[in-house]
Amino acid sequence: MQAKVSRIVFASGNAGKVREIGQLLEGLSIDVLPQSDFNVPEIEETGCTFVENAILKARNAAHHTGLAVIADDSGIVVDVLQGRPGIVSARFAGVGASDEDNLNKLIEMIKPFPEEQRTARFICSMVYLRHEYDPVPIIAQGVWEGQLITDPKGSNGFGYDPMFYVSSQQCTSAELTPEIKNKLSHRGQALTHLLGKLNEVYSME
């Protein structure tokens, strides 16, 4: 049995993601530290898929910290837009765009389509690297199905949450409590799958 991992870096500068991961891992016997604690510079996301970008971010953080790393790449995929915004969800309205900018751009793009065609899903690819040169990253994925609305609702969450309608809850993602969102969300699903795989490698009690 390999030694228990007590310190893992989470490779993200997104405050919303850091907050969600902290809530999801609360109570577990692992210490997850944001990469900002180590002044890790952001890396250009040059991958063509969510998982490629997650691995790029993980290797970058592992290189600068010398620690094991969890990284994710996530976004929203809209059927009538042929999968856009996809991997550019965070910069859909341009580099440096705010959440509101991205949200407004997507609203304008889906307005011409009838409600029944506004199906979408959040995707999260999450990876774990033991070290910078780890040749076999542990990979997990989560998918959260929903429908887009053009009248944003709710103040919880971030990003596209106010326009992502969850039919099982009859509200948007931004109207959910953190506890319910973490059980349903793409990120919560991916992390649950990842932790299950990590438990096969490490003793985490």
Image (cartoon, rainbow, N blue to C red):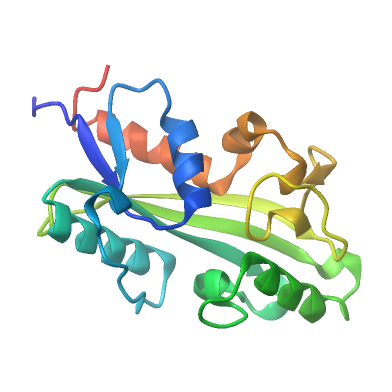
Is residue 125 visible from the viewing direction of this image? yes
Q: Position of residue 54 (x, y in %)?
A: 35, 61
Q: Position of residue 7 (x, y in %)?
A: 21, 35
Farthest right residue? 114
122 to 108, vertically: above or below: above
Q: Residue at x 73, y 38 (%)?
A: 176
Q: Quadrant of the C terminus?
A: top left
Q: Nearer the viewer, residue 116 or 57?
A: 57
Is residue 189 visible from the viewing direction of this image? no
Task: State left or right for residue 179 relative to residue 176.
Answer: left
Q: Quadrant of the N terminus?
A: top left
169 to 122, vertically: above or below: above
Quadrant of residue 93 in the image? Answer: bottom right
Quadrant of residue 125 in the image? Answer: bottom left
Q: Residue at x 69, y 67 (%)?
A: 100
Q: Position of residue 27 (x, y in %)?
A: 40, 20
Q: Position of residue 35 (x, y in %)?
A: 29, 52
Q: Residue at x 60, y 57 (%)?
A: 122
Task: State left or right for residue 59 relative to residue 167.
Answer: left
94 to 86, vertically: above or below: below
Q: Residue at x 15, y 52 (%)?
A: 65
What number of labels is visible?
0
Task: State left or right for residue 22 relative to residue 115.
Answer: left
